[in-house]
Amino acid sequence: MLIAVVSLITPAFLKPVNLGNILAQTAVIAVVAMGQQLVILTRGIDLSVGSNLALATVIGGLVYQQVDSSFIVIMAMLLAGAAIGAINGLVFVYGRLPHPFIITLATLSICRGVALALAPGHTTMRGMPNAVTAIGGSTTLGVPNSFFVVGMFALLFLILTKSMVCGRWIYAVGGSPNAARSMGIPVRGVLLSTYVVSGFCAGVGAVLLAGRTGAASPIYGNLLELDTIAAVIIGGASFLGGRGHLGHALIGAVLIGVIRNALNLLGVDVFFQMIAIGLVIVIAVEADVLRNHLEARARVLQAAAVQ
């Protein structure tokens, strides 16, 4: 419906070039949001993904200055992202923190500071291997290669959540951690794995963004954590955990991309774009609250009818 309305208001929206831009611009949000989706399914949150992505690009840029190898640079970014995710998970799970908000907020600041400290001159480093720029910045048959990367990860996550036991464990832990523990599910291992995956997805996002821009920068990923959380919630997932599927994160990412692109085409100031995204988030959260309230009332009425 949104795409139909926007295409009527701004005919340039449906031009192939513009659609390709939307796919390329939303690829980073989409792939990182899929990792965020798993964390939110377990009633958690990862605020560090934006800073994690920035640090991963800086590490990739520093490695590229020493070794002209696409494989090594890509692996450096992926491993850096996964390592930060592992730190988040380990401190949250084994540090017995009351909520992951605390550690991920801390690593948000730490990663950004480390990225700024490591980057020469605390600024952008130009240059990336050819394979990285091909993945993040080139197209195949007019379709951005980053779109195919998102599609590949979407398929992997779909298999994980729908066909694998560990994927069902994630839903069980999010639905009721105590019940999952009593059933013999390794709750700590499940929680730790979701943060590792979220960090790894931030590393993938770093590869895509560094490839699209041909550079590494400590200021990349600013407010990306809010975009990914917004994508998951706007798509229809629940902050209460245990509910949601992969499509929610992807739909939410596309919605954010379409809204921003449409406002750009309409010449709306960037500050009003931020307001618009914020209002959409509020509406989505309130819709989730209303849905939970109506479902609770429906269960009560159903129980009363049975009695």
Image (spheres, helix red, strand yellow):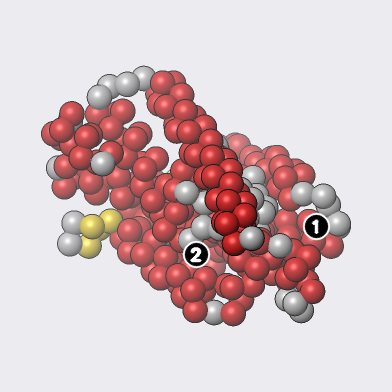
- Viewer-proximal residue, 179 or 302? 302
Viewer can see residue 182? yes
Kind of element beneath mark 2: helix
> Counting other residues with Cα less than 10 Å from the Cα at mark 1, is it few (<14), some (14-19), or many (20 or more)?
some
Tell whether 138 sits left or right of 37: left
Q: CA distance from mark 2 to mark 1?
A: 26 Å
Q: Residue at x 60, y 37 (%)?
A: 122
In the image, residue 109 above or below residue 36: above
Q: Which mark is residue 74?
A: 2
Screen quadrant of the C terminus? bottom right
Q: Which quadrant would residue 191 be assigned to in this image?
A: bottom right
Q: Nearer the viewer, mark 2 or mark 1?
A: 1
Q: Amino acid at mark 2?
A: Ile
Q: Which mark is residue 296?
A: none
Kind of element beneath mark 1: helix
- Viewer-proximal residue, 205 or 183? 183
Q: Residue at x 23, y 57 (%)?
A: 143
Q: Residue at x 54, y 79 (%)?
A: 164
Report the residue marked by disc 1. 91
- Viewer-proximal residue, 135 or 7? 7
- Looking at the image, the residue that sits furthest to the front is 307
Q: Amino acid at mark 1?
A: Val
